[in-house]
Image (spheres, rainbow, N blue to C red):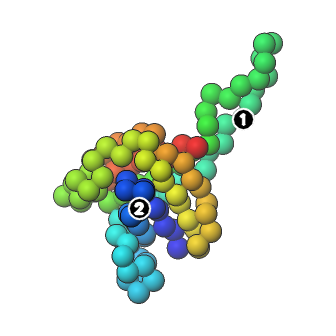
């Protein structure tokens, strides 16, 4: 089971799970989590004056935005802490760094 926790309010995070998750497993979660892409890692490249990476670790995910439900709830959650869990194990943690919205709300979570 995939789960997203967004800490818009640090004391009361919002929980999102996949639509197929039974209500008994996650009774307080919204079933809006449509997909989570693979983790992207940036490799360091060598240069004459040093080594650098132009991309930090990141994950893209999509929430159902039917009738603008996700946008109305979250607004523009830039720099909000996000945690993604897979089968109760922390898969990735970072901050919301970008978003695109339409029928889905796509969030870019970066380390």
Instruction: Categorize mark 1 by other alpha carbons within 10 Å: few (<14), some (14-19), many (20+).
Output: few
N-terminal-most mark, 2 or 1: 2
Coordinates of residue 29 in the picture (x, y in percent): 38, 72
Residue occupied by mark 2: 11
Most extreme residue toward the left, as rendered?
Answer: 67
Task: Check whether the beta carbons of the residues at disc 2 and disc 1 lie within 8 A of each other.
Answer: no
- Label 2 or label 1, whichever lies nearer to me, is 2
Q: Which mark is residue 20?
A: none
Q: Residue furthest bottom?
A: 24
Q: Secondary structure at mark 1?
A: loop
In the image, residue 47 sits, relative to residue 64, either above or below, namely above
Q: Quadrant of the C terminus?
A: top right
Element assignment for label 2: loop
Give the residue at x 52% y 58%. Answer: 83
Q: Is residue 80 above or below residue 30?
A: above
- Which residue is denoted by mark 1 in the rendering? 43
Residue 57 visible in the picture: yes
Residue 58: x percent and y percent? 57, 44
Question: Would you call the spot at circle 2 few (<14 residues within 10 Å), some (14-19), or many (20 or more)?
Answer: few
* Label 2, label 1: how far apart the Cα atoms are: 35 Å
Left or right of 36 on screen, residue 71: left
Q: Name the image quarter holding residue 46.
A: top right
Which of these two is toward me, 14 or 46? 14
């Amino acid at each position: 089971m995939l789960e997203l926790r967004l800490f818009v309010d640090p004391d009361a995070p919002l929980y999102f799970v996949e639509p197929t998750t039974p209500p008994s497993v996650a009774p307080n979660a919204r079933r809006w989590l449509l997909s989570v892409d693979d983790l992207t890692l940036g490799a360091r490249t060598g240069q004459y004056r040093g080594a650098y990476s132009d991309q930090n670790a990141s994950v893209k995910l999509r929430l159902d935005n039917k009738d603008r439900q996700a946008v109305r709830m979250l607004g523009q959650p830039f720099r909000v802490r996000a945690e993604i869990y897979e089968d109760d194990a922390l898969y990735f943690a970072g901050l919301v760094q970008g978003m695109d919205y339409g029928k889905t709300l796509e969030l870019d979570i970066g380390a």
